[in-house]
Amino acid sequence: MALRGSLEGPQAPLTHLPDLTEDAMAVDVLTEITISRPADVVAAYAADPSNAPAWYENITSIRWETEPPLRTGSRVAFTARFLGRQLAYTYEITDFVPSERLVMRTAQGPFPMETTYTWQALGDGSTRMTLRNRGEPAGFSRLAGSVMTAAMRRANRKDLGKLRHILEANAEAY
């Protein structure tokens, strides 16, 4: 560990200090919702980054870095606020199967993240959507992993609820 290595020396071994990695953790948050709309409708709306500011409370803007439409290899820059901080990051689409799965990753900043959406058609014309965020925070964010996990879980539930409301309340539009 960098901290331990930088402080160790001949004068005092640090074996009596707790291992700080015990407080650090990877973040892996899986959230699920059922939306009373067909999977192709839910997926088309949720997978379009231009719609993200409408249903993600923390995302304030997006900018396409590659030309739409969305496909594997597309890059989209996001601006967001999370835990009181302004964040700017770019996701690259690493896997996209329309109406089934979208995987996007960012490797920059203090919190490299992978976000996965899946859509499963249910027999009654509704859709089960999952939203999974996972990553390995660095720096202070690494030590605050449990706080970030709880905040992310609350935000994801709220965001998926807003997505459901948008799609179900405006069924004729989508």
Image (cartoon, helix red, strand yellow):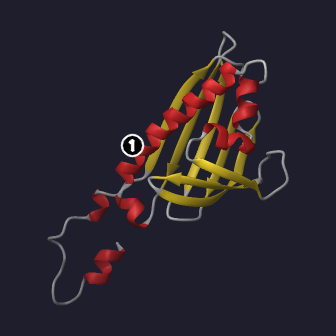
Q: Residue furthest bottom?
A: 10
Q: Residue 107 at what x, y percent from top left?
A: 59, 62
Q: Is 15 displayed left or right of 6 in the figure?
A: left
Q: Residue 54 at what x, y percent from top left?
A: 66, 38
Q: Residue furthest top?
A: 124
Quadrant position of the C terminus in the picture: top right
**Residue 39 is drawn in which quadrant?**
top right
Residue at coordinates 64% horizontally, 33% vertically from top-left?
118
Question: Where 47 sits versus 110, above or below?
Answer: above
Residue at coordinates 77% horizontally, 49% vertically from top-left?
72
Q: Is 132 displayed left or right of 43 in the figure?
A: left
Q: Which residue is mark 1?
A: 150
Q: Label 1's element?
A: helix
Q: Is 132 displayed left or right of 105 in the figure?
A: left
- The one nearer the camera, 45 or 112, is 45
Mark 1: give few (<14), some (14-19) or many (20+) Cα within 10 Å.
few
Question: Where 99 sits versus 11, above or below?
Answer: above
Q: Residue 73 at what x, y percent from top left?
A: 77, 54
Q: Residue 41 at what x, y percent from top left?
A: 75, 25
Question: Where 131 sits versus 8, above or below?
Answer: above
Question: Where 63 sits versus 154, above or below?
Answer: below
Residue at coordinates 74% horizontally, 44% vertically from top-left?
50
Q: Is 25 displayed left or right of 117 in the figure?
A: left
Quadrant position of the N terminus in the picture: bottom left
Report the number of discs. Answer: 1
Q: Disc 1 residue type? A: Ala
